[in-house]
């Protein structure tokens, strides 16, 4: 710390602090570098930093306020330590007697300290003549050591002006401290937020990795479970999509020599949105999916389902395939309706539906046919990919089988058919999926 300071100011905090601060200000304004431990150090602390500052300053200025040297009789007194250290290092001692407040030296203090009274005091008037007496001290005591110094643009001349300057300095320092505290707090908060976000990121990353592992395990299990269908699942499917694929495949019934499978139930709202995404009400989950066109089924659902599963045989049935399944396949049921001659046992139709569609889940009190297929008669008319009749003016119609909840009994038989347009949508029209392994 050599050549860091010109003047080290030593003072007794009790009674001397106000003089020391004003004296420091006056010297700083007049171009001197001053060390004053007003903000940094505490009473009773005499450490390496204080020693280094004394050693670095050629002038040791001692503020002789009232009773300032009385405690120098105590060996651990910090003012005593500062004075003795300054004497040891042969500093120029400049005693300052503020407002003639100094009242003598205690008789038991060390002789080296008491000898300070032999040095001429610089009497400083801490009033209207403050600037004059400080300048006189500088001229007599400091300029012989340092030469003339250039004063700052602001140089207070009296006590009131100095107090105003100190007040401004204190206000600025308080603002800076508050700003530092605010900035530090903000930094701490930002660091904490960053840590929380990082932990959240790690947690989310771990959760995603766990999800990927669970999805991979589920994909592997489903591909093993349905290997006979040639299932190869897309790696981008969600849990909901995988669960929906599982539901679709486990409800497929083999109708013809491992070459034709037909869904046990009409395709539901839950299956549609489970594959393609979207919201629906829980109570609608097992209702047949209606209000969609033949084109939407073929181009939206079937194309997506084939891409998801690599099962190219997903399709709508032909009329022949549908009727073969409705009549029990190899069991060759001869009943009028699919599964029974008693329409009330197997079908929702105009007389018993309450003019509304019913869930197709096997839990509504209706019995299936001999292949365990439900609602082949009634509930909703089911789309087939066979054309109906002869095209008129280039307009092609497709075939609906089985009748619906608005149909009379004679239109919900196992052989009932009617036509519908490619883009037609209705609450009475739904469909049932098949998997075909040969044309």
Image: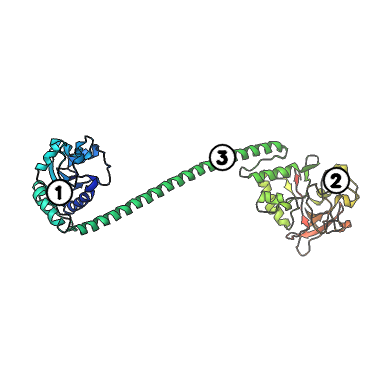
> In front of the other: label 3 or label 2?
3
In primary-sequence order, the first of circles 1 and 2 is: 1
**Residue 403, image quadrant:** bottom right
If the image is split into quadrants, where does the C terminus sit? top right
Residue 280, x across and y down, in percent:
69, 54
Can residue 421 be seen here? The reply is: yes
Residue 291, x across and y down, in percent:
73, 58
Q: Is residue 76 above or below residue 240?
A: above
Q: Nearest the camera: 145 or 259?
A: 145
- For disc 2, the marked residue is 369
Q: What element carries label 3?
A: helix
- For disc 1, the marked residue is 97
Q: Is mark 1 on a helix, strand or loop?
A: strand
Can residue 303 be seen here? The reply is: no
Q: Nearest the camera: 281 or 149?
A: 149
In primary-sequence order, the first of circles 3 and 2 is: 3
Gap in Å between the C-alphas at discs 1 and 3?
77 Å
Gap in Å between the C-alphas at discs 1 and 2?
118 Å
Q: In this view, does 333 lie to the left or right of 210?
A: right
Q: What element carries label 2?
A: loop
**Residue 106, image quadrant:** top left
Residue drawn at (37%, 49%), measured in percent from left and top? 181
**Residue 246, image quadrant:** top right
Q: Are marks 3 and 2 in contact (CB under 8 Å)?
A: no
If the image is split into quadrants, where does the N terminus sit? top left
């Amino acid at each position: 710390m050599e050549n860091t300071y010109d003047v080290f100011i030593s003072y007794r905090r009790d009674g001397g602090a106000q003089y020391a601060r004003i004296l420091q200000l006056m010297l700083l304004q007049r171009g001197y570098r001053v060390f004053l431990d007003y903000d940094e150090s505490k009473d009773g602390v005499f450490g390496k930093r204080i020693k280094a500052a004394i050693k670095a300053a050629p002038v040791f200025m001692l503020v002789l306020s009232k009773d300032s040297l009385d405690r120098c009789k105590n060996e651990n007194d910090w003012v005593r330590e500062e004075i003795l250290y300054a004497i040891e290092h042969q500093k120029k001692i400049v005693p300052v007697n503020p407002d003639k407040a100094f009242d003598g030296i205690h008789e038991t203090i060390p002789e080296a300290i008491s000898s300070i009274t032999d040095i001429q005091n610089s009497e400083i008037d801490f009033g209207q003549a403050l600037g004059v007496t400080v300048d006189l001290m500088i001229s007599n005591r400091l300029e012989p050591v340092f030469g003339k110094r250039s004063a700052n643009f602001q140089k207070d001349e009296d006590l009131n002006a100095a107090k105003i300057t100190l007040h401004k300095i204190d206000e600025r320092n308080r603002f800076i401290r508050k700003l530092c505290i605010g900035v530090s707090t903000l930094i701490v908060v930002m660091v904490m937020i960053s840590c929380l976000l990082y932990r959240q990121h790690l947690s989310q990353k771990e959760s995603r990795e766990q999800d990927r592992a669970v999805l991979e395990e589920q994909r592997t299990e489903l591909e093993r479970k349905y290997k006979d269908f040639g299932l190869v699942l897309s790696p981008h499917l969600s849990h909901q999509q995988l669960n929906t694929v599982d539901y679709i495949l486990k409800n497929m019934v083999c109708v013809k020599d491992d070459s034709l499978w037909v869904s046990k139930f009409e395709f539901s709202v839950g299956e549609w949105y489970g594959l393609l995404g979207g919201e629906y009400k829980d109570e609608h989950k097992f209702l047949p999916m209606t209000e969609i066109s033949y084109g939407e089924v073929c181009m939206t659902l079937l194309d997506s389902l084939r891409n998801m599963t690599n099962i190219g045989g997903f399709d709508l049935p032909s009329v022949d395939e549908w009727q073969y399944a409705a009549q029990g396949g190899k069991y060759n049921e001869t009943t009028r309706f699919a599964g029974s001659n008693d329409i009330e046992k197997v079908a929702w139709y105009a007389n018993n539906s309450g003019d509304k569609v019913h869930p197709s889940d096997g839990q509504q009190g209706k019995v299936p046919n001999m292949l365990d297929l439900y609602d082949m008669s009634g509930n909703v008319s089911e789309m087939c990919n066979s054309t109906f009749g002869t095209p008129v003016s280039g307009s092609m119609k497709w075939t609906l089988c089985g009748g619906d909840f608005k149909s009379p009994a004679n239109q919900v038989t196992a052989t009932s058919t009617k036509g519908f347009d490619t883009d037609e949508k209705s609450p009475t029209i739904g469909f049932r999926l098949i998997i075909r392994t040969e044309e």
